[in-house]
Amino acid sequence: MAQVMEFKLPDLGEGLTEAEIVRWLVAVGDVVAVDQPVVEVETAKAMVEVPCPYGGVVTARFGEEGTELPVGAPLITVAVGAGAGDAAGAGTVQEPEESGSGNVLVGYGTDHSRTARRRRVRPASAAPAPAPAAPAAVAAPAAPAVRPAGPVPVISPLVRKLARDNGIDLRALTGSGPDGLILRADVEAALRAQAAVPAAPAAAPATAAAAPAGAERIPLKGLRGAVADKLSRSRREIPDATCWVDADATELMAARAAMNAAGGPKVSVLALLARICTAALARYPELNSTVDLAANEIVRLPSVHLGFAAQTERGLVVPVVRDAHERSAESLTAEFARLTELARTGKLAPSDLTGGTFTLNNYGVFGVDGSTPIINHPEAAMLGVGRITPKPWVHRGELAVRQVVQLSFTFDHRVCDGGTAGGFLRYVADCVENPAVLLRTL
């Protein structure tokens, strides 16, 4: 007899708690192999194909395309073993001690410590079961019974996020789950208890009434929502300042042409600028840092993980080149090309988009000269590069046409003063105008 296995949306890592179904890769009745991708989802970080740890026949799918699901919600059920073809109407789900590949996404795999258990399968078209009624053990907000110091019994990151977003102290709750585990229903019950306290009625949002007829509303969710949240947080928390300088990039372009004419892999302008940035950060390590507000400390980071802004059909993303300070211009060129291709095809992993310590923003590709970038929180600085274009320039005392670029530098004024920022930018400009300056650091 076939066993019907339920596969849930796994933990996608990086603190992500939900994902939107973009495209189903299988239909009910399809045969799937172990670790075969079954659905493509979009998180706040990237597009991800989710592989299923079970092989068999798909008996149900949960959620239509465009639906947002929390981590831990059912994705599909799969009939495994003999008689799998007849299991579509089976009424139980088996979660065995040993099945599945155990080789899925971050934080998800077969847990051999659990014993087998059975429960009813919801029909594929059924809506998720409503949350249970408020447990009697939940304390009223007026007099919460605060839990003693120690770990709070909460497993689900979604429950933690729900409590954090609504100002609920998890230590004040008594869980209704096994061994006092705090469930989503417990947090929702606390929210209902809070809402029962009389309060002045909130005014309806003015934007809903003010929108003219025919106006298009675009949800701020997924990648677009993540970008909006990050940029808003940067503006709220970071007291940034910007300085800029024009530089004669003629010698840099000539050096690149000579390097590429010598044979071997081609070197990109972006890679040369990245190499200049890492040399400048070695001189001014204050700018490769972050601010820890909780500890009230500036944290100087030992490695340069260089982010670079990339515009894609899905929006702006910032892939990260790990240990950029240890890479040559050729290695940087290859890594930029690899990450750009992954970004273009929507296949960047969440780990490719996190952990940056400094960002290089080449907005010159849009045909503009200057900009005042918003710092990529929680970093402390960003170098912006405009287009390199022929302009009149005084060279060796005479007017000439030279390849000129505007460099703009935005920095967190908490980590340094203007002298440090000016020194960094001046060093970058000197290297652009005379690449031989870099030889001191090679």
Image (cartoon, grey):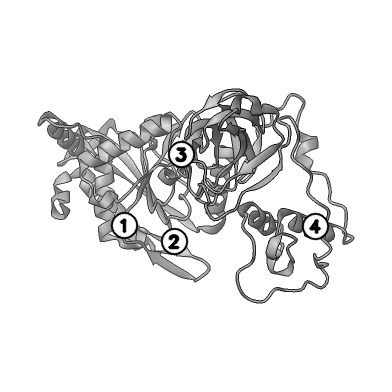
Sequence-wise, the earlier of marks 2 and 1 is 1
Q: Position of residue 292 (x, y in %)?
A: 48, 65
For label 1, the crowd category at 10 Å Cα-Cα, with few meaning under 14, some 14 to 19 and many 20 or more, is some
Q: Quick check: can you spot residue 220?
A: no
The answer to whether residue 158 is above or below residue 285 is above
> Residue at 16% of width from left, 50% of height from top?
437
* Residue 317 numbered mark, or none: 3
Q: Give the CA separation, mark 4 to mark 2.
A: 44 Å
Circle 2 — which element? Answer: loop
Q: Is residue 298 left or right of residue 400?
A: right
Sequence-wise, the earlier of marks 3 and 1 is 1
Q: Position of residue 282 (x, y in %)?
A: 26, 58
Q: Residue furthest left?
A: 262
CB atoms of marks 1 and 4 within 8 Å: no
Q: Position of residue 129 (x, y in %)?
A: 77, 42
Q: Is residue 144 left or right of residue 437?
A: right
Residue beneath disc 1: 303
Q: Amino acid at mark 2?
A: His
* Residue 198 numbered mark, or none: none
Question: Depth-wise, is mark 1 or mark 4 nearer the camera?
Answer: 4
Q: Quick check: can you spot residue 94?
A: yes
Residue beneath disc 2: 413
- Front residue of 51/261: it is 51
Residue beneath disc 4: 189
Sequence-wise, the earlier of marks 3 and 4 is 4
- Front residue of 43/224: it is 43
Q: Give the CA separation, mark 1 to mark 4.
A: 46 Å
The quadrant the N terminus occupies is top right
Q: Residue furthest bottom?
A: 148
Sequence-wise, the earlier of marks 2 and 3 is 3
